[in-house]
Image (spheres, rainbow, N blue to C red):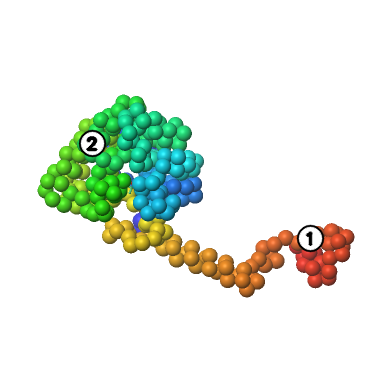
């Protein structure tokens, strides 16, 4: 039987996610960073669109998320805002934008919401960020938490590795998850943790978990758009299922264009404009050129 895409016309909001969890619905999240892809993702019925700071890896070419600035995030959040109608639009708080005090963090989150048009912000970190999440929620900002592998900690971690692999580390993750829920986060990203721990956390908290490399038991799944479309470079993590190979599609299209230009078959007459006959006569355009002009 063909797969029928569920009809989900209603606008997704931060509070509606908890109700979806209660109903046992599996929701879907993807990243997007620009108008055309955000529009396609929204029109495909994806429930949450995250302008992730993975922007630094997959769009800006930084190699990691550390250098991404608030201004860069704002530019991309605004472009995505113009495209998205139904999905919940979440913006990542980039590294450095919430580390220098709660007032500064509120100011930066408000910019993402007011100037960028984000409906929620996401920030990385567990118990350390509890006071901050409470403060942002007090200021009416919807906050998504993010624990497990936190890419902004790359300089401290040394490498991107599976987190929560010992009993102590797993207990810490569970504590962090509960702390995020108590602080008022409306959802929680679990990045690259063992599926058993993700399941335990998902069953232990009432806010939805959003898994990336965290197994099938999370309430919501997220992937980085460029990774699943085959549009990012380097080795992919095992959880990235390649749904398309845009790398090859784009390379092929660009190479064929270059070949056509070099061998003179692009543009054809149909792909260019001719001069009207009267103007051609007046300008004494030569016979061959004129015959082309008359046809146009
Ligand atoms: O920046 C990002 O894209 C993210 C997702 C991987 C959850 O944080």
Q: Position of residue 125 (x, y in %)?
A: 26, 40
Q: Position of residue 156 (x, y in %)?
A: 25, 48
As helix, strand or loop, the secondary structure at mark 2 comes to helix
Answer whether residue 161 is visible to the viewer in this image: yes
Task: Give the Cα separation between the discs numbered 2 and 1.
Answer: 70 Å
Is residue 121 depicted above or below 287 in this figure?
above
Taking the view exactly as shown, the residue that stands out farthest to the left is 167
Q: First in sequence: mark 2 or mark 1? A: 2
Q: Find out if the beta carbon at label 2 lies less than 8 Å from the nearest ligand 1 atom.
A: no
Instruction: State the residue at coordinates (31%, 39%).
Output: 123
Q: What is the crowding at mark 2: few (fewer than 14 residues within 10 Å), some, or many (at least 20)?
A: few
The residue lying toward the viewer, choosing from 107 and 34, is 107
Q: Nearer the viewer, mark 2 or mark 1?
A: 2
Answer whether residue 85 is visible to the viewer in this image: no
In the drawing, what numbered circle is on residue 128? 2
Taking the view exactly as shown, the residue that stands out farthest to the top is 138
Q: Position of residue 280 (x, y in %)?
A: 84, 62
The residue lying toward the viewer, choosing from 131 and 185, is 131
The residue labelled by disc 1 is 275
Q: Find out if the beta carbon at label 1 lies less than 8 Å from the nearest ligand 1 atom.
A: no
Determine whether, in the image, residue 229 is placed left or right of residue 192.
right
Instruction: State the residue at coordinates (32%, 29%).
Output: 102
Q: Quadrant of the C terminus?
A: bottom right
Instruction: State the residue at coordinates (35%, 32%).
Output: 105
Instruction: State the residue at coordinates (28%, 60%).
Output: 238
The residue lying toward the viewer, choosing from 119 and 263, is 263
């Amino acid at each position: 039987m063909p797969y029928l895409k569920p009809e989900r016309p209603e606008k997704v909001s931060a509070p509606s996610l908890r109700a979806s969890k209660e109903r046992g619905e599996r929701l879907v999240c993807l990243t997007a960073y620009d108008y055309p892809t955000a529009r396609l993702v929204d029109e495909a019925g994806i429930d949450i669109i995250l302008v992730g700071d993975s922007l630094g890896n997959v769009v800006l070419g930084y190699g990691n998320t550390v250098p991404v600035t608030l201004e860069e995030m704002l530019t991309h959040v605004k472009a995505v805002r113009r495209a998205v109608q139904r999905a919940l639009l979440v913006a990542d708080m980039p590294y450095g934008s919430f580390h220098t005090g709660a007032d500064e963090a509120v100011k930066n989150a408000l910019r993402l919401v007011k100037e960028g048009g984000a409906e929620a912000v996401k920030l990385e970190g567990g118990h350390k960020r509890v006071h901050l999440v409470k403060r942002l929620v007090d200021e009416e900002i919807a906050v998504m938490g993010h624990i497990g592998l936190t890419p902004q900690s790359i300089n401290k971690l040394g490498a991107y590795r599976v987190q929560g692999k010992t009993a102590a580390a797993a207990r810490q993750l569970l504590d962090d998850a509960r702390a995020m829920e108590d602080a008022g986060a409306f959802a929680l990203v679990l990045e690259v943790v063992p599926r058993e721990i993700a399941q335990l956390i998902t069953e232990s908290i009432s806010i939805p978990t959003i898994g990336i490399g965290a197994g099938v038991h999370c309430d919501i799944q997220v992937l980085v758009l460029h990774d699943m479309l085959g549009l990012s470079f380097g080795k992919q993590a095992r959880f990235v299922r390649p749904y398309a190979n845009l790398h090859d599609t784009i390379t092929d299209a660009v190479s064929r264009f270059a070949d056509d230009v070099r061998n003179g078959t692009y543009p054809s007459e149909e792909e260019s404009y001719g001069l009207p006959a009267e103007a051609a006569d007046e300008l004494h355009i030569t016979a061959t050129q004129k015959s082309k002009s008359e046809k146009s």
